[in-house]
Image (cartoon, helix red, strand yellow):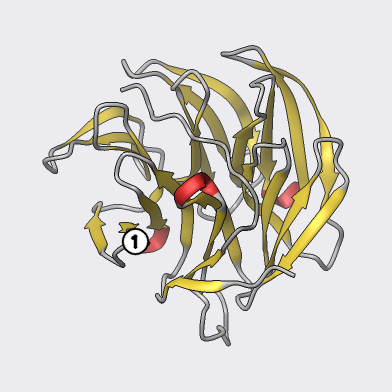
Amino acid sequence: MSTYEVAVEARAELGEGPTWDPAGARLLWVDVLASRVHTYDPATGRRTVHDTGEHVGAAKPRAHGGLVLNLRDGVGLLDPDGAFRWLRYDPVPGRRANDAAVAPDGSLWAGTMRYDEAPGGGTLTRLTGDGTAEPVLTDVAVSNGIGWSPDGTRMYYIDSPTRRIDVFDYDGERVRNRRTLAVIEDGAGFPDGLTVDAAGGVWVALWDGGAVRRYTPAGALDREIRLPAPRTTACAFGGPGLTDLYVTTARVGLTEPTPLSGSVLVVPGAGEGLPQPPFQG
């Protein structure tokens, strides 16, 4: 029986995007609606906060230091010294950034959504370090979890209102042959962020489900970890050996949030994660 611990006690409006930064031995995560990027060092407890100035969907490490940020008005680069510049400036009224992930080749796959969550208002775009942007999906409602299989031949993807975890074939740059891996049943919440473990299992956080689930590469439900925050948003492995599962949560929209809604939780020894590549830019 897996038990959780509180990694970061917080009151994040919309905690999202946990990402282990191996170079800094720290966890990155964002509070989307507070426009903040947080870091947490589990060895020392040290925390930092960076204000991005606009809603931020994700923050990922870059190969030569600093972060790549999926922001409301596009994708930007934050240098280690705090200097910022746009990689791709693409503001669309009524639209914001959401989850993002770095592919095995070092490209950033950045999702967007409309604030009103209108079907077809969101996108998924592949960006390389020189700012080249290639549309992957253009008919999305709430672009969310993205991850790749250990052998790099599959990409997993979530458009939350569909209740599906989808899978594509991946050739190193592009995806094709979209199909359903698993469907989250009515009453169990909506699939949000995901991560893939070293055995190929797909872990997904359930918004309004208060849980994280693991699905096998064949799509069978393998495990469920219940957590004391109904709006679990995303998960990622981190810590020494990538064995600890970090889970972000949200308070937004809850009339009666639980005491830990908005905190970052951790399930020690939950599994074995995959090292995540940095963005090559």
Quadrant of the snapshot with the C terminus: top left
In this rendering, the answer to whether 193 lies above or below 230 is above
Residue displayed at 46% across by 52% down: 239
Q: Is residue 16 above or below residue 278?
A: below
Number of marks in picture: 1
Task: Say whether residue 163 is visible.
Answer: no
Q: Position of residue 208 (x, y in %)?
A: 68, 69
Residue 42 in view (yes/no): yes
Q: Residue at x 25, y 27 (%)?
A: 64
- Would you place residue 208 above or below residue 169 in this image? below
Residue that badge 1 annotates: 43
Q: Secondary structure at mark 1?
A: loop
**Quadrant location of the N terminus in the rendered image:** bottom right
At 32% from the left and 31% from the top, the residue drawn is 62
Q: Amino acid at mark 1?
A: Ala
* 136 vs 231: above or below: above
Who is closer to the viewer here, 95 or 36? 36
Tell whether 240 sits left or right of 140.
left
Question: Residue 91 at what x, y percent from top left?
Answer: 36, 37
Taking depth in this image into account, of 21 and 34 the one nearest to the observer is: 21
Q: Residues within 10 Å of mark 1 (few under 14, many from 20)?
A: few
Residue at 88% over, 46% down: 220
109 or 27: which is nearer to us?
27
Q: Position of residue 120 (x, y in %)?
A: 64, 38
Quarter occupied by residue 65: top left
Residue 274 coordinates in the image, percent (x, y): 57, 37
